[in-house]
């Protein structure tokens, strides 16, 4: 995503506040587009369907959409970082013509798996035929959107990403109102699913326009499951870590049953969801400022090594990398701390606006801290990926998943006053370990680089052959992002 960040920084260099606002708005949409648009669309749909469906049907509708998004993330998780690493290697080798075939190959892998899982679940559910097909379409569309966003991180026309989500949201709302007023529950779900399908189709068209028309799917990225197996595990561990505390609450005595065998936890889900919204500004700030500033010194360091610069020069770049990491982490802490502080200052007004009950106030407060810390985990994970420290990334994500699940069960045993503290504690411990480990590795960066990473220029005499094969471990490719 740093490539988009550099293009957004050109807007920041403009002379007007409009350019500044556009840069951060684009960044917010790119980094959290699915969440932002879905939230807005669902809020509008919820306002509409309250007049046409019962309270129980409204809860079921939102629950089914949450389950569809959960299943889509789990289905894409094993491929997420595998595909990202493959694209990073192809981008380094300037083989962008392989992006579109790889996109087709990724969809050919993900769609059948998701369809099988979706059909296996839906065949046993007492839903109407329209509801089942709408849910299946929603699952596939959202899964395709996750995959498409991996490819569009290298796109030049980043404005299309925001436009795709905006069009999908508008179509989803309009279709939901149109069909919902005629068919009720089925119509609202079908309309929302159509909107997500439009988003995916626009993103797919943009991939074809950006990287060339597809000439048939390619599956070279599947080799990376053998050469980089940890990346698949990292994707699964990170996704499980995000959802495991919700699962624990859903299927506990504190959970609520909706639509038969679907379960949610209203007391926990709503305040934690609102807490996650508070890190949206930090995600935009990370793309425009933190990651792009880090990438500059990162490239300078490895460029000096490739140019066989003196050791003193390499050491100077190493110091610059370490200082930049410290500076960017400090900037994140100050920026997100300010955002969280403002939320706390207007805590009662926000709680009243979203109709939180007093029992959820404490969960929301501790959730703000937990979301703050989890954003820090995401930043540390990104640094690990840039340096290709996959074992550390796996430990980081695995530790968070285990702690988040274990502490969630512990807080459930304590009772309502402890809800949310498990997530915050898991995030704190994981972030503490990740920060310590990051600085340990960065302190020995030059030693690690020379001992474990082959630093050789790509052989020019084999350039033609290289274009006909995927990049392998013998070619230099630093990091996943």
Image (cartoon, grey):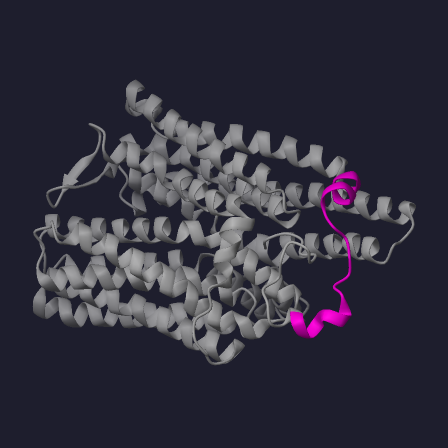
Image spot of residue 318 (x, y percent) = 80, 45
What secondary structure prevails in the magenta region?
helix
Q: Position of residue 204 (x, y in %)?
A: 41, 73
**Residue nearest the observer in this picture, 417 or 384:** 384
Q: Quadrant of residue 362?
A: top left
**Nearest the camera: 315 or 282?**
315
Task: Check residue 413 for magenta coloring.
Answer: no
Is residue 156 among what the camera can see?
no
Q: Is residue 453 magenta?
A: yes
What residue lies at 39% left-to-right and 40% top-to-bottom?
240
**Which of the image's four quarters has the C terminus?**
bottom right
Closer to us: 172 or 385? 385
Residue 241: x and y in percent read: 42, 38
Q: Residue 230 versus residue 429: which sits nearer the camera?
A: 230
The number of numbered badges drawn on the structure is 0
Q: Which residues are magenta?
A: 446-465
């Amino acid at each position: 995503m740093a490539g988009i960040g550099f293009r957004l920084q050109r807007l920041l260099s403009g002379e007007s506040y409009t350019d500044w606002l556009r840069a951060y708005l684009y960044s917010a949409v790119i980094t959290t587009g699915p969440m932002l648009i879905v939230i807005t669309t669902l809020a509008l749909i919820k306002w509409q369907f309250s007049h046409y469906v019962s309270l129980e049907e409204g809860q079921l509708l939102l629950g089914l959409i949450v389950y569809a998004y959960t299943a889509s993330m789990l289905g894409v998780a094993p491929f997420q970082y595998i595909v990202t690493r493959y694209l990073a290697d192809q981008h380094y080798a300037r083989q962008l013509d392989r992006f579109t075939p790889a996109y087709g190959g990724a969809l050919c892998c993900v769609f059948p798996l998701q369809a099988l899982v979706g059909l296996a679940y839906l065949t046993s559910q007492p839903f109407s035929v329209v509801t089942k097909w709408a849910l299946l379409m929603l699952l596939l569309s959202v899964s395709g959107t996750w995959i498409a966003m991996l490819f569009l991180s290298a796109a030049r026309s980043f404005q299309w990403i925001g436009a795709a989500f905006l069009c999908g949201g508008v179509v989803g709302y309009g279709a939901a109102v149109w069909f919902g007023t005629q068919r009720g529950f089925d119509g609202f779900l079908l309309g929302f699913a159509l909107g997500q399908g439009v988003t995916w189709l626009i993103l797919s068209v943009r991939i074809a326009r950006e990287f060339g028309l597809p000439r048939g799917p390619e599956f070279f990225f599947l080799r990376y499951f053998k050469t980089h197996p940890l990346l698949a595990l990292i994707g699964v561990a990170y996704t499980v870590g995000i959802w495991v505390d919700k699962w624990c609450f859903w299927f506990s005595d504190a959970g609520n049953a909706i639509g038969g065998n679907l379960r949610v936890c209203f007391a926990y889900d709503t305040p934690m969801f609102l807490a996650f919204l508070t890190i949206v500004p930090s995600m935009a700030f990370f793309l425009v400022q933190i990651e792009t500033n880090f990438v500059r010194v990162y490239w300078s360091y490895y460029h000096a090594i490739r140019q066989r610069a003196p050791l003193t020069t390499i050491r100077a770049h190493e110091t610059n990398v370490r200082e930049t990491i410290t500076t960017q982490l400090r900037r994140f802490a100050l920026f997100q701390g300010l955002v969280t502080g403002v939320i706390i200052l207007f805590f009662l007004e926000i709680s009243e606006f979203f109709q939180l009950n007093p029992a959820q106030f404490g969960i929301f407060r501790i959730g703000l801290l937990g979301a703050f810390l989890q954003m820090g985990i995401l930043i540390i994970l990104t640094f690990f990926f840039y340096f290709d420290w996959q074992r550390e990334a796996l430990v980081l994500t695995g530790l968070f998943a285990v702690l988040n699940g274990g502490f969630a069960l512990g807080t459930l045993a304590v009772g309502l006053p402890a809800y949310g503290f498990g997530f915050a504690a898991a995030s704190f411990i994981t972030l503490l370990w990740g920060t310590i480990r990051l600085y340990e590795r960065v302190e020995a960066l030059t030693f690690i680089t020379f001992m474990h990473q082959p630093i050789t220029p790509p052989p020019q005499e084999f350039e033609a052959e290289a274009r006909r094969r995927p990049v392998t471990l013998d070619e230099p490719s630093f990091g996943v992002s």
